[in-house]
Amino acid sequence: MEGILNTLTNFISADVRTAVPLLLCALGLVFSERAGIVNIAAEGLMLIAAVSAAIGSAYFGPWGGALLAAISGLAGALIFTFFTITLRANQIVVGTAFNIFAAGLSVTLNRRFLADVTVTGYPLRAIPGLSQLPFVGDLFFNWQLLVYLTFLGVPLLQFVLYRSNLGLKIRASGEQPRACDSVGIKVNRVRTGVVLFSGILAGLAGSYVSLGQASTFIEGMVAGKGFMALAVCVFGNYTPVGAMGAALLFGAADALKYRLLTTELGSYYQFLNMLPYLITIISLMLLSHRSNKPAASGKPYIKE
Amino acid sequence: MKKQLTVLLSGLLLLSSLAACQSGSSPSATTTTATATTAEAEQATTADSAAATTAAAESSQTAAASEEEIDASTLKVAAIFGGAINDGNWNETQYNGLKQIEEEGASIAYLENVGDTDAAQAARDYASSGYQLIYLTTNSYQDYCLPVAADFPDTTFVSINGTVNQDNYISVRIADEQQGFMMGLIAALLSESGKVGFVGGLEINPIKLGSSGFQQGVDYANQNYGLSVEAKRINTGSFTDVNQAKETAISLIEDGCDVVTPMANDAGVGVMEAAEEKGATAIASGIGQETSAPTATAVTVVKDVAVAYTETFKAYRNHTLSGSSTVETFGANKGVVYLTDWLTDASQEVKDRVTEVMDQLANGEIDIDLTI
Amino acid sequence: MNQNAKQFRFKSELKQLLLPLFSLVLALALGYLTMLLMGYDAAKAYQSLWQGIFGSRNAIAESLVQTTPLIFTAISYALTYKAGLINLGGEGQLYIGAVWGSVLGSRLSGIPVWLHWILIFAAAFAGGAIWGAISGLLKVRFKASELITTIMLNYIALEWVSFCVTNLPFKDQTAGAAPRMPTVVDNVKLSLLLPKTRLHSGFILALLVLLIYYLFMWKTTKGFELRVNGQNPNAALYAGMPVKHNAVLAFALAGGTAGLGGIINILGLQYFLTEGFASGLGFSGVAVALLGNSQPLGILLAAFLFGALNAGGIRMQTAAAVPSAMISMIQGIIIFFAVSPYLLSWIGTQLISGRNRHNLSLQNQLPPESAQLAMTTDRGKSDPEKSR
């Protein structure tokens, strides 16, 4: 019995560790997608944030890391909005360019600032009392601060998106930009706002890759997590709660993969590595009939 | 209008390019002429290299006559890396080797993160800009760079882990399997649970050799010290995804492995962190990896490829680099594979056994099977 | 077309050409500054970049070598883009095509070479086409976002390639060989266009495919249908076109083209498939297609720009010791500016905004033609096709 429980808690912990950065980034993407912006720069934003977080942590401690990551995410998002909203360039190609740029920048920053320093990861914050509970204590109440915040953010953002005036404006900007304009909503301002917000979240997500999952920065360590976050956003049907489900399902697929690696199947690791991607595709198939994809997704809005 | 312009232009371009290749636009025609040119080129190359060999022979004769060491400051040395020079492992030790060559007075240059296909172009670039000695840091460059070596007979190419030794292309073999063997042996000796884990990166030959060596190291311990330790070896398919390496190591530990070892360049740090967090023992395989697991690291089995650099450079200066038909192996015998001081208090018996086997390896008394 | 309109059109053609040029210059200037800031010899870097692109016969050949596969992945994106779909899966399609082609290319050594070529190309095209069509099918049958499925299929393809180069029955079984697929047989290797360089006749094939892309998209009914779907899906539906069928077809053709690109790089340059041999080609192809406005000539020029930057980038590293990271940054900056059609007018607005900020909206500064560069911006409105 204890063995089974142990296996289960281990499994869920692995699930959460993988899911957190995807979810955090996807929460921001849900908002920018809803406002009509397709942000494939998420990968690059996370990469730059991951190195910024490591630099901040090395020189000012973990809090400094989080702050610097958020700032770098914001700065990256500013570049993205300048080109896609102000200059109305194609969102996909600006995202692609940003990712290429970010790959170079992260290496440059790493070499310059992280050669001979020690990076401290985010510390675990056990919640007094609750974390002492058998099994569930360690599972739910012994994580880094950012993990609690991420999961608390889900209902909050769900509320903002669906129950607040702001959420209405955001969703309207993605569905009916022209109608929005006619009732006085400044579409491009709303869009800029959400992209900046999603930049901050992508930044924090990146910081969790270098300070939460590990306590170091390695060039190329984001390894597609930004794209996975985008997939999580779509396959969570563009809602925060959906994204949480999707991220946890994805994390579970990943956790399962690692457990299967230790069995005889381990020599076919390539097929195990495919698991999360296959599950994403299958889930998209199953979700087909109720899509919240905004009508004006990916299209720049030009005021007439 | 615009459409027509585009048609016209594309048409013109196509025509002109076809005209440029001159020998006719039908594929078969192109092929025949091209085969001819290739044949010509081959002839030319053979002639070239023949001339080069005589030249080289002459120069080595004169050198042998004068026995004069080449002044390091007159030399330009380049290296082409497949990964990042700060990976704490394979590439970093080689970069250190290059740095030591610089300290001896040579001027150096390097390229990192070079894909296999681009390596040929990079090698050609260095060779044509006057670099006399070019290090190719991974065996996957070999197929692309052999033709370059043929085109530049005056440049010497040193292929780390290459398999070919001819004229100006010299291969040295790094004994990856010895590093794996020692890691396996130590892991087996330290294990209490009877299960030890190995996390490899990309499934390339050096890693496969290391992995096979690990298994043989564990087997050796089982046979000679009456143990029954099981080795679990996993490849992740990545040298950079730290989280993947870490989660893999965690699941190995949760599966019962109490000693884990990485051989995954950059990503190896993840394995060290997993051991530290989950209270397992780790055996490090790269420089500085122990800082990621200060309490968990037992010892580091270093594979310091820099030694191969300084030795080959010295040989080059003394005109002794070339000629030998067998590829030289750099392992424990040359001080490429060695152990650092122990960081945890293993029993004296374990330490003695490890030292003994290490010596045997260095003296060539242990045969490791190299089939992968 | 009256005289005025002609003149206007000529002017805007000129503008279309000047705009990317201006962006390029601006981006290079920014790159220059960045390099200076980081303490590199920027002048020497650009000098060696130029040398690496045009400096010698070999340099030009290398630029074209790097251009070749980009043409294929760019067409792969452009074709679906014109049909109103997003295909970020060029890389995966290229790999699958290369795997299928390599399997045949390393076998069947006895048969006539022309037949062998046909079989190899057919296999590569089919492999890529099937891989692409999966996204198309998922799109029309399940409304699954092709943006996501193509990226996922890229990852799956990469894992599959990783399996093929390390496992039987696909891997090269030569003793001591690095992980790879077997070398293709000698007589199917593509001939060199310039002896003693690496420029192979795959470049001619790329131009040929570009021409076919043009003829198909602009001269056939199917191509017309695809473009209508891209410009106005409702109109396509209303006109009774087989919209769903066409979407799958577009993806299959796009995938097939990418697959051809993969096998051509194997037959002409690599001779055997290794893991990661096409790394980054997919996303660069996207940038090339958008930079080239999905037009054949534009794709050719943009692909050359990217290919040249790749080739010259190597020289920039060897001769001026500028690290590859710096080159990625400069490439990113170039794309940023090169795909921003409103850059000039934006700068204009900023400069005169002090005087009469309110009189100038960005929109009425622009001739209709340059709006086309924005691509997703109200597609069709400014398409030359429609003005006829």
Image (spheres, helix red, strand yellow):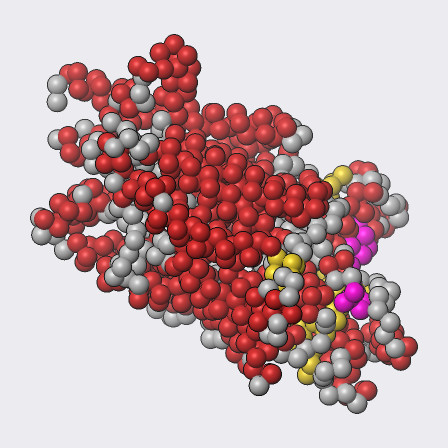
Q: Is residue C176 above or below residue B129?
A: below
Q: Quadrant of residue A70?
A: top right
Q: Is residue C380 above or below residue A20?
A: above
Q: Residue at x 34, y 50 (%)?
A: A162
Q: Quadrant of residue B360?
A: bottom right
- Most extreme residue toward the front is A129
- Number of numbered labels in the structure image: 0
Q: Residue at x 30, y 14 (%)?
A: C359
- Most extreme residue toward the bottom is B226
Q: Residue at x 15, y 16 (%)?
A: C3
Looking at the rendered image, the quarter that the C terminus of chain A falls into is top left
Closer-to-camera residue (B32/C190)? C190
Would residue B179 be found to the left or right of residue A298 on screen?
right
Would residue B326 be found to the left or right of residue B314 on screen?
left
Residue C206 can be seen, yes or no:
no
Q: Which residues are magenta?
A: B295-313
Q: Residue at x 61, y 66 (%)?
A: A130
Residue A58 covered by magenta stretch: no
Looking at the rendered image, the quarter that the N terminus of chain A falls into is bottom right
- Most extreme residue toward the top is C355
Closer-to-camera residue (A161/B351)? A161
- The x, y position of residue C297, in whole percent, is 31, 36
- The x, y position of residue A15, in whole percent, is 52, 67
Closer-to-camera residue (B193/B369)? B193
- The x, y position of residue B140, in whole percent, is 60, 59
- The x, y position of residue B25, in whole percent, is 31, 45
Residue B195 can be seen, yes or no:
yes
